[in-house]
Image (cartoon, grey):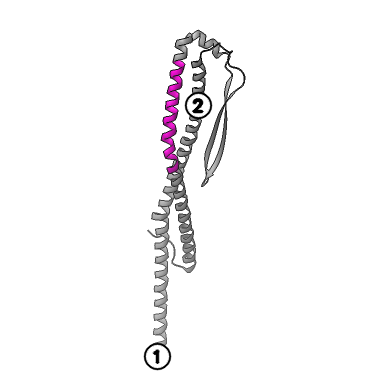
Amino acid sequence: MKMELAATKANLLSVKEGLALAQEGYDLLSQKQEVLLTELLHLIADVKRVREEADTALAEAYTSLQMVLAHLGTDGARRLAQGCQDRAGVAVQERSVMGVPVPFVKVKPTRIGPIWGLGESPALLDDMVEQFRRTIVLLGEQAEIETAVWRLTKELGKTHRRTNALEYLVIPQHQETVKFIQETLEEREREAHFQLKRFKASPRL
């Protein structure tokens, strides 16, 4: 459907400029869409892997916790837990993928001081702590990847809608308008030329 504009040379020039901008925008958005899709395909394979690894690590860590509780009892485990000063340092940075901020999460468990004395705890308690540390790192990686996928997917959807609007609405509308104005101006020129020929051919008084 063409735009409702008067068939003038000024409007023809304006619509042609708009058409050129729309086509340029379409090309840029198509490139952006391709880059976003490529990035998503790289990440999607990692989503399943890290999710499975994190789920497995978490299940193993809680199994170890249950074994510790069975071995030490709730009161014994609570007493030892009071001396635990482990912390997890989390650093979040971002990189840009076609203007989309994609997070980079680094989780680093740190031990501030001794957890418990030598011979005070069974070896399975140390195993449990290491398993929870590993789980925390994997959960950080999972958060990073899933957040990146969510943001890129959202931006890809917006880009796809804009690309479709340009391809199926804006560009055809401008093309149709250019065609209409050109044909109208050409018809006017033919009529003017015909009228001029008739005037020249008419007998002079």
Q: What residue is rendered at 54% in x and 37% in y? A: 104
Dot in front, 1 or 2: 2
Q: Position of residue 148 (x, y in %)?
A: 48, 38
Query: Could you tell me how far apart the alpha carbons at marks 1 and 2 are, in whole angstroms?
Result: 103 Å
**Which quarter of the rendering shows the N terminus?**
bottom left
The three-letter amino acid code for the residue at tag 2 is Arg
> Does residue 3 show up?
no
Q: Position of residue 45 (x, y in %)?
A: 42, 39
The magenta span reads: 40-66
Residue denoted by label 1: 203
Q: Residue at x 45, y 19 (%)?
A: 62
The chief SS type of the magenta part is helix
Residue type of the residue flagged with mark 1: Pro
Among the two numbered marks 1 and 2 on one chain, the one whose residue lies closer to the N terminus:
2
The answer to which of 145 and 133 lies nearer the viewer is: 133
The picture quadrant where one finds residue 94 is: top right
Residue 34 in picture, x, y percent from top left: 44, 50
Q: Is residue 55 above or below residue 65?
A: below
**Which residue has dot 2 on it?**
134
Q: Is residue 13 above or below residue 36?
A: below
Is 109 on the left or on the right of 172, as rendered?
right
Question: Quarter-wise, where is residue 184 in the image?
Answer: bottom left
Indicate the position of residue 55 as horizontal and vertical percent values: 42, 27
The C terminus appears in which quarter of the rendering?
bottom left
Look at 42% across and 60% down and name the residue there. 174
- Give the SS element for disc 2: helix
Query: Is residue 55 within the magenta segment?
Result: yes
Q: Are marks 1 and 2 in contact (CB under 8 Å)?
A: no
What is the residue that sits farthest to the left in this orientation?
Answer: 1
Residue neighbourhood size for the residue with mark 1, other residues' Cα within 10 Å, grouped as few (<14), some (14–19), many (≥20): few
User: Which residue is found at the position 49% from the left and 23% from the top?
Assistant: 131
